Image (cartoon, helix red, strand yellow):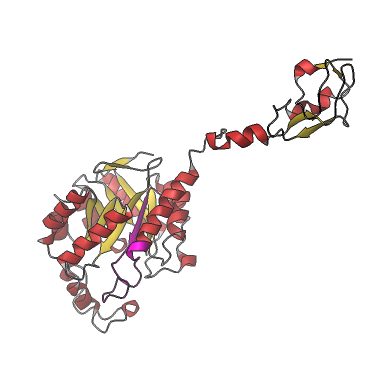
Amino acid sequence: MDTFEIGDRTVGPGEPTFVIAEAGSNHNGDLEMAKKLIDVSVDAGADAVKFQTFRAEDMYVEDSGEVEYLDDDRSIYDIIESMEMPYEWIPELHGYCDEQDIHFLSTPFDEESAEVLKEYVPAWKVASYTSSHHPFLRSLAASEKPIIMSTGAHELDEIRESVDLLKDTGAEDFALLQCVASYPTPIEEINVKVVETLVDEFEVPAGLSDHTLDPVTAPSAAVALGASIVEKHFTLDKTMEGPDHQFALEPEELSEMITAIRDTESALGTGEKFVLDAEDELYRKARRAIHAVEDISAGESFTSKNVKILRPGEREAGLHPKYYEEILGKIATRNVEQSAGIRWSDVKDQ
């Protein structure tokens, strides 16, 4: 499976998890708040901070009605319209991210927004509800930028259709994210094992776009299962007004999540089994070996009463335990003091 580049970062198996701090629309229409969200992402150690770029008229029919989970009397169209990020912010936010050495991303929801973003983002993020918008996917693939596509609210066969389209359009660098389109997602429904399924089915890097309230469990589990990318919403304050604040992480939780991801990566290691430097003392002092448990005179036989398989502690370790039966009944070539390790030079046949 191939890796690919997002800016100066390599994304894929064997590389550090690419962490996307999803600011979304939690700027509440305030440019300075958007910059504070970037600051929080940098402080937390994220690789990228991601906003959303859309226009209500290109997302919903105007007479769209309400959405129950938002607990807002306005129509979804009016809510989305109130969350629009001005296009003129994009160059300034991109420049602010450059100054802070963090990648600027923003999810486009329509062709016009993608055109505005094109020169400012190193990769495309495709939202779950757009992942079956084939004409839009085709236009993104034509740009030759890497694509990260969420898969919430879609069946595996639908994902396969979109993947085939991307490949047929010439897209070479893309990743798929397990996502559950529920805000927030109950922890028992996040189904992190789908990360493995996406890797197995499509042989591309996969990851998790997580909407659970827990900052650690699902992201850490995803990394343990091979996730190359983790994305999570965050906010300055969960109590702020707006549809996406309540299920987002607060700054200290975002830091906790990224720390947990990096700790999980460290804990996973390389998969190569060998004695580590950290094990050296107990390797020498606690691995069992063959030792005398009483003084043994030269010419005396080794028996189950005068030798045992014990930990040497500060003493020099004796023979490996696998030789225990082999030395029983053999003769000591010299005087061996109690607790000494038995060596082959101490042993001769009868």
Q: Position of residue 277 (x, y in %)?
A: 53, 34
Numbered marks: total: 0
Residue occupying the point 83% across, 27% down: 325
On the question of residue 182 being in view, the answer is: yes
Residue occupying the point 42% across, 47% down: 199
The quadrant of the rendering that contains the N terminus is top left
Residue occupying the point 31% across, 64% down: 234
Could you say which is closer to the camera, residue 152 or residue 331?
331
Q: Position of residue 276 (x, y in %)?
A: 54, 34
Q: Is residue 127 above or below residue 164?
A: below
Q: Is residue 320 left or right of residue 101?
A: right
Could you say which is closer to the camera, residue 288 or residue 101?
288
Q: Position of residue 327 (x, y in %)?
A: 82, 23
Residue occupying the point 70% across, 29% down: 315
Q: Which of the 4 quarters of the picture holds residue 159?
A: bottom left
Q: Position of residue 316 (x, y in %)?
A: 69, 26
The quadrant of the rendering that contains the C terminus is top right
Judge whether residue 92 is colored magenta: no
Most common SS among magenta residues? loop
Residue furthest to the bottom:
73
Could you say which is closer to the camera, residue 59 or residue 306?
306
Q: Is residue 274 left or right of residue 56?
A: right
Q: Which of the 4 quarters of the picture holds residue 3?
A: top left
Q: Is residue 311 above or below residue 301?
A: below
Q: Is residue 341 above or below residue 350?
A: below
Judge whether residue 243 is colored magenta: yes
Could you say which is closer to the camera, residue 273 or residue 13?
273
Residue furthest to the left:
88
| Magenta extent | 227-252
On the question of residue 226 being in view, the answer is: no
